[in-house]
Image: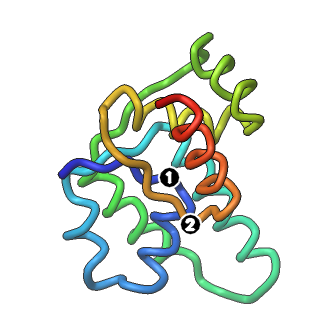
Amino acid sequence: MSLVFDASAIIRLIELEPNKAFDILRGQYTIDLVYYEIGNYLWKISKSSIINIEPLIKAFNGALSLMNIVSIGLNNDVVNLARKMNITYYDAAYVYSAMKLNTKLVTDDKELIKKVSKYNNEHR
């Protein structure tokens, strides 16, 4: 089964299951925004502690190289979805991708899970 993973899910998976992450993510989907979101995560952790982020960059790049990266760009449908769901464009791009691929979104964002569930219930 194909899935769309957002950055929070990829980060959590690599943190908690580094040995299984590659197998889980292989052939799955994400969007091109993921590079910037994970980059921002790495920047934040590098600011708050003395940590060598090079192994993390290598792990994330390795995992992402196994995934199908969907380019969303600027998209009117995503803007409209963000407005309807009252979520950011970032989050709406992941939701939109899952909808277009007719699959599920995997996220670690509890608020996004609630909003997607509410939206899906209202639009059945």
**71 w.r.t. 12: above or below:** above
Residue at screen point 64% across, 67% down: 42
Please tell me whether mark 1 sits on a helix, a strand or a loop.
loop
Residue at screen point 27% across, 85% down: 19
**64 w.r.t. 30: above or below:** below
Residue at screen point 56% across, 49% down: 117
Q: Residues within 10 Å of mark 1 (few under 14, many from 20)?
A: many
Q: Residue 108, how many percent across, how many down?
A: 56, 66
Name the kind of residue labelled 1 in the image: Asp
Q: Residue 8, how many percent across, how many down?
A: 56, 62
Q: Determine which of the numbered discs, if any, sits on residue 108 in the image.
A: 2
In the image, 35 versus 115, the foreground residue is: 115
Q: Determine which of the numbered discs, if any, sits on residue 6 in the image.
A: 1
Q: Determine which of the numbered discs, if any, sits on residue 14 in the image.
A: none
Q: Is residue 27 left or right of residue 92?
A: left
Front of the two marks 2 and 1? 2
